[in-house]
Image (spheres, rainbow, N blue to C red):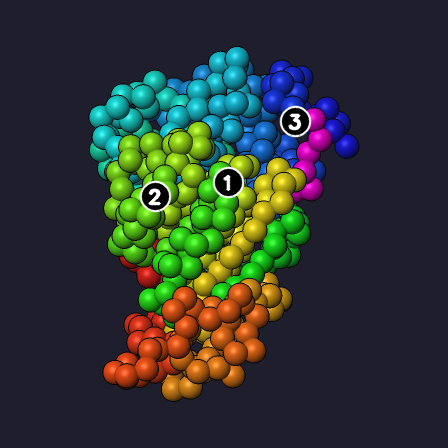
């Protein structure tokens, strides 16, 4: 099947062909016909499967066919996304699809001034891509209204729940017309998501590709069991082996991401960081430098786990394992894109063994060990290494790495103090797998 067979407007299929897009992906093949028939759609698919076109093309087709323009301060189609990066990615795609047409696609996100966004919305928008918080800011200032909105899309809805946007979604939904078409796309379908779907969608058609937790086939996964204090040294060593290839490094916290980025710069790498403490301008400049390969390494929190489409990323490092197991799938999905190969390397400290177990349960796979040995839980969330002494950086007796840490055994004479195997105990992992606010 190709896009011509889906019944899309010729102008739209020509725009797709100009971008080299002729054949729809599985999620597009399933979702677009139902959406074009006016049905509410609930799509379950991982990032990188073509969801933007799955919901964007039917809306653009309808708006092109109608041939009318939006009224002042109104929005005809509203797309909500959980992060600025994802919202920007969606906007770029929609603008490419509508190039040369009369349709206006606008973007509103936090981290930038309100004034220019208010001005851009004065004449209305055919399609508006927004993060929930900034959208509410504009609505509170009466810079726009939603009573004429015909389409609502919730993209990466599960992450919006993780980020605590449920109350914002309820408020926004109350301002929309009851008669509208709603599409919800999510990588996972937790119980609360079913409740949202039941409240916001009317008799939706459910489409699904790639079961939840399935990782990309072309991603090679490995894990290093290593003490927390030794992670930076190992990361620098591994990054040094492929200096000419793009690498994305995930940290659990904003402070940790910034500190790690600076340590990599001090080690001679070109690195940038993206996290919630950065302004939108800073985040945009960092992403542009990474895409242009002016910076070969980007250190980020989970704000970059979805919506980041940079085909050249060859390596993804989980410097810290995510507290939410599903985020591991999204993180490593930033590599092996557009049919390419990629590598996902994870580091596991003693107090992260619980996170690892949750991840392997979700992906239904034991991640192959690159070095060290799997930590064994002891008391609480602490752990000790299996079958070796000390918290050595690599391998150890019987390990699968490349030998012990540099320096070998302690020198004779003055003995070194001995702590728990694997280094000092770190903060306990949050219970319930919840997402820490500091990760934004």
In the rendered structure, the answer to whether residue 179 lies left or right of residue 337 reads left
Question: Quarter-wise, where is residue 84 in the image?
Answer: top left
Residue 99: image location, x then y, percent: 52, 17
Split into 4 quadrants, where in the image is the N terminus? top right
Q: Which residues are magenta?
A: 21-27
Please name which of the two marks, 1 or 2, marks the residue nearer to the observer. 2
266 versus 89 height, above or below: below
Location of mark 3 (residue)? 21
Q: Disc 2 and disc 3: Cα gap in Å?
A: 40 Å
Residue nearest the viewer, comparing 22 with 117: 22
Residue 320 visible in this rendered orientation of the protein: yes
Task: Name the residue rendered at 52%, 13% in the picture.
Answer: 100
- Of the numbered discs 3 and 1, the one sitting upstream in the chain is 3
Secondary structure under tag 2 reads loop
In the picture, the disc for residue 245 is 1
Q: CA distance from mark 3 to mark 1?
A: 27 Å
């Amino acid at each position: 099947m190709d896009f011509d067979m889906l019944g899309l407007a010729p102008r739209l299929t020509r725009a797709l062909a100009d971008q080299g897009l002729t054949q729809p992906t599985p999620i597009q093949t399933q979702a677009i016909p139902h959406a074009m028939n006016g049905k509410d759609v609930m799509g379950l698919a991982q990032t990188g499967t073509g969801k933007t076109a799955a919901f964007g093309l039917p809306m653009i087709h309808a708006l092109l066919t109608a041939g009318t323009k939006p009224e002042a301060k109104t929005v005809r189609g509203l797309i909500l996304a959980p992060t600025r990066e994802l919202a920007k990615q969606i906007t770029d795609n929609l603008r490419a699809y509508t190039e040369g047409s009369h349709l206006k696609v606008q973007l509103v996100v936090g981290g930038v001034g309100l004034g220019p966004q208010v001005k851009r919305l004065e004449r209305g928008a055919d399609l508006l891509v927004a993060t929930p918080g900034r959208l509410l800011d504009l609505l509170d200032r009466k810079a726009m209204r939603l009573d004429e909105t015909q389409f609502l899309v919730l993209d990466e809805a599960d992450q919006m729940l993780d980020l605590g946007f449920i109350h914002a979604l309820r408020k926004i939904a109350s301002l929309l017309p009851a008669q509208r078409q709603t599409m919800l796309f999510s990588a996972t379908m937790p119980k609360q998501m079913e409740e949202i779907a039941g409240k916001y969608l009317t008799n939706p058609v459910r489409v699904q590709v790639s079961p939840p937790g399935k990782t990309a086939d072309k991603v090679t996964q490995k894990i290093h069991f290593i003490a927390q204090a030794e992670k930076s040294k190992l990361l620098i060593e591994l990054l040094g082996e492929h200096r000419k290839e793009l690498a994305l490094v995930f940290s659990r916290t904003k402070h940790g991401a910034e500190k790690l980025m600076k340590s990599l710069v001090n080690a001679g790498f070109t690195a940038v960081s993206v996290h919630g403490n950065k302004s939108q301008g800073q985040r945009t400049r960092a992403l542009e430098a990474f895409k242009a390969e002016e910076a070969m390494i980007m250190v980020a929190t989970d704000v970059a786990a979805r919506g980041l489409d940079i085909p050249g990323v060859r390596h993804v490092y989980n410097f810290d394992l995510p507290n939410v197991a599903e985020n591991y799938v999204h993180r490593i999905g930033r590599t092996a894109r557009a049919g390419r190969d990629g590598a996902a390397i994870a580091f596991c400290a003693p107090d992260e063994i619980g996170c690892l177990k949750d991840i392997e349960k979700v992906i239904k796979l034991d991640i192959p060990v690159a070095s060290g040995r799997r930590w064994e839980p002891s008391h609480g969330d602490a752990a000790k290494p299996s079958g070796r002494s000390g918290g050595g950086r690599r391998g150890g007796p019987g390990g699968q790495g490349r030998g012990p840490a540099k320096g070998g055994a302690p020198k004779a004479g003055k003995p070194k103090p001995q702590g728990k195997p694997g280094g000092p105990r770190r903060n306990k992992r949050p219970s319930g797998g919840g997402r820490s606010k500091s990760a934004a």
